[in-house]
Amino acid sequence: MKKISLLIIFFYLIALIQTSFLIHFKILRFFPNLILVFQILLTLLEEPKEKLTLFSAIFAGFFWDIFSENPLGLGILILFSITFFLKLVLRKYVRFPFLKRI
């Protein structure tokens, strides 16, 4: 429960930074999407059998929807499907022996 609440606060702050500060910086005519980048990084760094990033995808997508002009639910759908697909690929096809916990 503590990890989930920390992730909620983390993605809320990232959404605020993205919509208030990074809107002024364009990279090749696109705005950086920190919520998407951090969600993918969290998914790649988590154990493939854990489910914490699936919950964080819902919260990150919710904050992405609230702070954008997209319809409500689109960000949740995008982040949840990307996270689910990455989890599936990491669980079935990718092995990281150096990331095993001791």
Image (cartoon, helix red, strand yellow):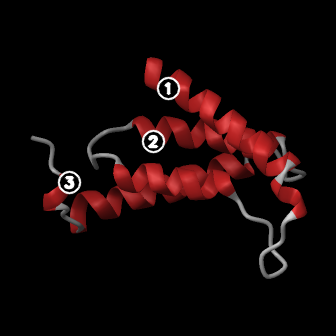
Q: What element carries label 2?
A: helix
Residue 93 vs 53, above or below: the answer is below
Please tell me whether residue 67 is drawn above or below residue 38 in the rendered image. above
- Which sits earlier in the primary sequence, circle 1 or circle 2? 1
61 to 70, vertically: above or below: above
The Cα atoms of the two marked residues, 3 and 1, are separated by 22 Å
Q: Where is residue 99 in the image (x, y as percent from the top left)?
A: 20, 54
**What amino acid is found at the position of numbered circle 3 in the picture?**
Leu
Image disc number at residue 99? 3
Observer-nearest of 63 and 85: 63
Kindly identify which residue carries mark 1.
Answer: 4
The kind of residue tagged 2 is Thr
- Residue 62 placement: quadrant: top right
- Which residue does the image show at 45% across and 42% down from the upper left? 53
Judge whether residue 25 can be spotted in this image: yes
Q: Where is residue 48 in the image (x, y as percent from the top left)?
A: 28, 49
Which quadrant of the structure image shows residue 66?
Answer: top right
Q: What element carries label 3?
A: helix
Q: Which residue is drawn at 41% across and 60% down?
A: 86
Q: Residue 53 carries which label?
A: 2
- Residue at 84 percent across and 49 percent down: it is 19
Could you say which disc has been placed on residue 67 in the image? Answer: none
Amino acid type shown at disc 1: Ile
Inter-mark Cα distance, 2 to 3: 17 Å
Between marks 3 and 1 in the image, the one whose residue lies nearer the viewer: 3
Work out whether residue 78 can be spotted: no
